[in-house]
C-alpha cells in the first residue's frame, strides 16, 4: 500500500519548488502445507483422503508460515532556479520487522545537485552543443534482506528417546543475534550528461565511491558452539568505479536509420573491515583488501614430469608423506620451501567479479523492418566449474571423461597435456587440494546476446481491421559466445548463481554449484494492439 502527496509551484517565473511525501506499507506472507504418501491405491481421488487410499498411513505432513513487514516514510524537496540550477534533498525512514528489536528503524538522507551548463551565456554561441549537465550527489540507502526470524534464534523440532519412550523437544538451530541491524551504504557520485549535433551523439559519464557498513551476511561459527552460522553485520566494504554510456545516430534519412548504443562499466570492490577488525576471516572466505567472493587455493606450476629433476623433487615431498607422481599438478609453495603444504601456502588467485563489462547494440531500420544485435562482454573474472573434463572434485576424474578430451590428459607418451594423468588410485593430497586449480578458469567471455528482426505492418493496411499496431518478429538468443576454457567446454560463465564461499570439501576457495550449459533459443512472435 502506498500513499503519495505531491506539491508543485512556480514563483516569479524563475523559482520552481516541488515536494513529495510518501508512505508505504508492505507485508509479505508465505504459507505452505505438505502431505506425502506412498503405495497409493488409485490416483482418482488425488490428495484427498489419503489415509484411506494408501497401504498403511501417509508418510508425513508439514505446514509452514513466514511473515515479514516493511513500513516506510519518505519526503523529497526539489528546487530549481531558472531551470538551470537544480537541488534535490530526500529523507526516508524505514522499519523492517526482520531486524532485531531496537534496531528495526533507520533514516537514510540524500542530497543531489545539477547544473545545466548549456543554458549559460558563455556557451550560448556553441551551436553544436545541445546538452551539458553536471551532476553531483551524496546519499544513503539501507538493506535488510535477511530471512524472517533469523535474529531471534528460531527453533526446530527434535525427536529423541527418553528412557524407553519417544519424546519431542524444540532445539534452536540458528544462533540469535539481538544486535543485527540495517546494512547502510553511503555513496558519493559525480556525473556529466552531454548531447551534441542535434543529439546525434549523446551520453553520460559517472564516477562513484560507495562505502557500505554493517554488511549483512551469514558468518560461519566454530563447531563447538553447536550452530552452523549466525546472520550478522560482518564489516565494511568499498566499491569505486566508472560507468560510461554513449548513443550515436550514425545514419538518419527518410527510409533508413542506423543507431548505436555503447556501455562500459568498471568497479573495484574490497573489504575494508570485518567484525574482528582488519584481520582476514579465512573460515568464511573473507580477506581484507579483496572482494567478498574470491578463489583461494594452492597455485600450481604445470605437471610433474618424469625428469631426474622432478623425480628428485617428488622424493622430498614423499619424505613428508605426500604421494605426488609424474602427471600430477606441481604445487607452488609460498615463502621458504619446506615441501609441506599448509594454509599459508594458499593464495587468492581471482574473483568472480569482472574487471569490466561492456555492451554494444546496433539497430537498423528500413521502412517497416527493424534489425538489432546486442553484444555483451564481461572480462577479468574467474569461474569455478566442476564440469571440467575431470568430473567431480571428490576424486581424480571420478564421474566421467569425454572421449574428445582423452588427448588432453597426461601420459608417458603425452607429456605436454593440459590435464593430470588418469588414475584409479588418486593421491589424497593432490585430489583434495592441489587439483582444485583445474576447476578455476578464466571466465571472460564475449557473447552475441540477442539478434532480432521485426516487421511493423503499415497502419493503412491495419485500419480496415480495427488494429492499431501489428509487429511480427523473430529472435535468436545467445547464438554465439567466445571465451576461455569454460566456453570451450560448453559451460556458460554468464551464470554466476549458486555461489558458495565454502565448497564441498570444506575449503573456502569459493565457487558455483550449479554450472549450466550454454543454450541457444529461437523465438517467433507478434505484437498486436487494438
Image (spheres, grey):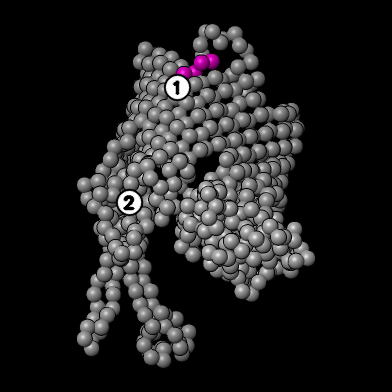
The image shows residue 444, relative to residue 308, as above or below, that is above
Residue depicted at 62% across the width and 39% down the height: 358
Residue 462 appears in the figure: no
Question: Quick check: 311 left or right of 159?
Answer: right
Q: How far across and down, in percent of the image, does residue 431 sit?
A: 57, 65
Mark 1 Cα-neighbour bin, 10 Å: few <14, some 14–19, many ≥20: some
Q: How far across and down, in percent of the image, does residue 103 sit?
A: 25, 46
Question: Quick check: 489 left or right of 1?
Answer: right
Can residue 117 be found in the magenta stretch?
A: yes
Q: How far across and down, in percent of the image, does residue 322 sit?
A: 56, 65
Can residue 22 be found in the magenta stretch?
A: no
The image shows residue 192, relative to residue 518, as above or below, that is above
* Label of residue 402 in the image: none
Report the number of numbered marks. Answer: 2
Q: How far across and down, in percent of the image, does residue 131 sit?
A: 56, 20
Identify which residue, 28 or 228, lies in the foreground.
Answer: 228
Give the Cα distance between marks 1 and 2.
Answer: 38 Å
Q: Nearer the viewer, mark 1 or mark 2?
A: 2
Instruction: State the SS at label 2.
Output: strand
* Label of residue 114 in the image: 1
Q: Main secondary structure of the magenta part?
A: strand
Q: Quadrant of residue 250?
A: top right
Image: magenta residue range: 114-118
Residue at the bottom extreme?
55
Q: Quadrant of residue 88?
A: top left
Residue position marked by numbered label 2 in the rendering: 232
Amino acid at each position: 500500500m502506498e500513499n503519495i502527496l505531491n506539491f508543485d509551484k512556480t514563483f516569479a517565473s524563475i523559482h520552481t519548488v516541488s515536494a513529495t511525501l510518501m508512505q508505504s506499507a508492505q507485508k509479505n506472507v508465505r504459507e505452505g502445507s505438505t502431505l506425502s504418501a506412498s503405495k497409493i491405491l488409485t490416483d482418482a481421488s488425488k490428495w484427498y483422503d489419503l489415509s484411506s487410499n494408501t497401504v498403511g498411513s501417509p508418510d508425513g505432513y508439514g505446514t509452514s508460515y513466514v511473515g515479514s513487514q516493511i513500513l516506510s516514510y519518505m519526503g523529497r524537496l526539489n528546487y530549481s532556479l531558472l531551470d538551470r540550477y537544480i537541488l534535490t534533498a530526500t529523507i526516508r525512514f524505514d522499519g523492517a520487522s526482520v531486524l532485531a528489536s531496537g534496531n528495526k528503524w533507520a533514516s537514510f538522507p540524500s542530497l543531489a545537485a545539477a547544473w545545466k551548463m548549456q543554458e549559460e551565456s558563455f556557451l550560448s554561441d556553441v551551436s553544436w552543443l545541445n546538452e551539458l549537465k553536471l551532476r553531483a550527489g551524496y546519499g544513503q540507502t539501507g538493506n535488510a534482506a535477511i530471512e524472517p526470524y533469523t535474529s531471534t534464534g528460531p527453533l526446530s523440532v527434535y525427536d529423541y528417546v527418553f528412557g524407553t519412550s519417544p519424546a519431542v523437544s524444540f532445539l534452536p538451530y540458528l544462533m540469535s543475534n539481538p544486535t543485527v541491524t540495517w546494512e547502510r551504504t553511503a555513496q558519493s557520485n559525480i556525473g556529466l550528461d552531454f548531447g551534441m549535433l542535434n543529439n546525434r551523439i549523446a551520453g553520460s559519464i559517472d564516477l562513484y565511491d560507495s562505502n557500505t557498513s554493517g554488511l549483512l551476511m551469514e558468518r560461519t561459527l566454530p563447531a563447538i558452539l553447536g550452530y552452523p552460522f549466525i546472520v550478522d553485520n560482518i564489516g565494511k566494504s568499498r566499491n569505486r568505479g566508472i560507468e560510461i554510456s554513449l548513443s550515436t545516430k550514425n545514419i538518419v534519412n527518410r527510409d533508413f536509420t542506423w543507431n548505436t548504443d555503447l556501455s562500459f562499466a568498471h568497479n573495484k570492490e574490497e573489504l575494508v573491515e570485518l567484525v574482528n577488525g582488519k584481520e582476514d576471516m579465512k573460515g568464511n572466505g573473507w580477506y581484507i583488501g579483496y572482494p567478498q567472493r574470491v578463489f583461494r587455493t594452492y597455485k600450481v606450476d604445470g605437471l610433474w614430469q618424469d625428469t631426474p629433476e622432478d623425480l628428485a623433487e617428488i622424493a622430498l615431498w614423499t619424505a613428508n608423506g605426500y604421494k605426488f607422481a609424474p602427471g600430477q599438478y606441481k604445487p607452488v609453495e609460498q615463502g621458504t620451501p619446506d615441501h609441506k603444504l599448509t594454509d599459508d601456502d594458499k593464495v587468492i588467485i581471482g574473483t568472480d567479479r569482472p574487471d569490466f563489462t561492456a555492451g554494444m547494440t546496433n539497430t537498423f531500420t528500413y521502412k517497416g523492418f527493424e534489425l538489432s544485435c546486442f553484444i555483451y562482454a564481461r572480462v577479468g573474472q574467474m569461474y569455478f566449474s566442476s564440469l571440467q573434463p575431470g568430473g567431480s572434485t571428490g576424486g581424480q576424474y571420478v564421474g566421467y571423461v569425454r572421449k574428445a578430451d582423452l588427448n588432453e590428459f597426461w601420459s608417458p607418451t603425452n607429456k605436454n597435456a593440459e590435464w593430470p594423468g588418469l588414475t584409479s588410485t588418486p593421491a589424497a593430497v593432490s585430489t583434495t587440494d592441489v587439483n582444485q586449480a583445474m576447476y578455476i578458469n578464466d571466465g571472460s567471455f564475449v557473447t552475441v546476446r540477442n539478434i532480432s528482426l521485426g516487421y511493423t505492418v503499415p497502419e493503412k493496411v491495419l485500419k480496415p481491421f480495427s488494429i492499431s499496431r501489428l509487429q511480427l518478429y523473430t529472435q535468436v538468443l545467445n547464438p554465439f559466445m567466445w571465451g576461455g576454457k569454460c566456453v570451450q567446454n560448453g559451460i556458460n560463465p554468464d551464470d554466476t548463481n549458486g555461489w558458495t564461499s565454502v565448497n564441498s570439501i570444506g575449503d573456502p576457495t569459493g565457487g558455483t554449484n550449479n554450472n549450466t550449459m550454454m543454450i541457444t533459443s529461437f523465438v517467433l512472435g507478434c505484437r498486436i494492439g487494438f
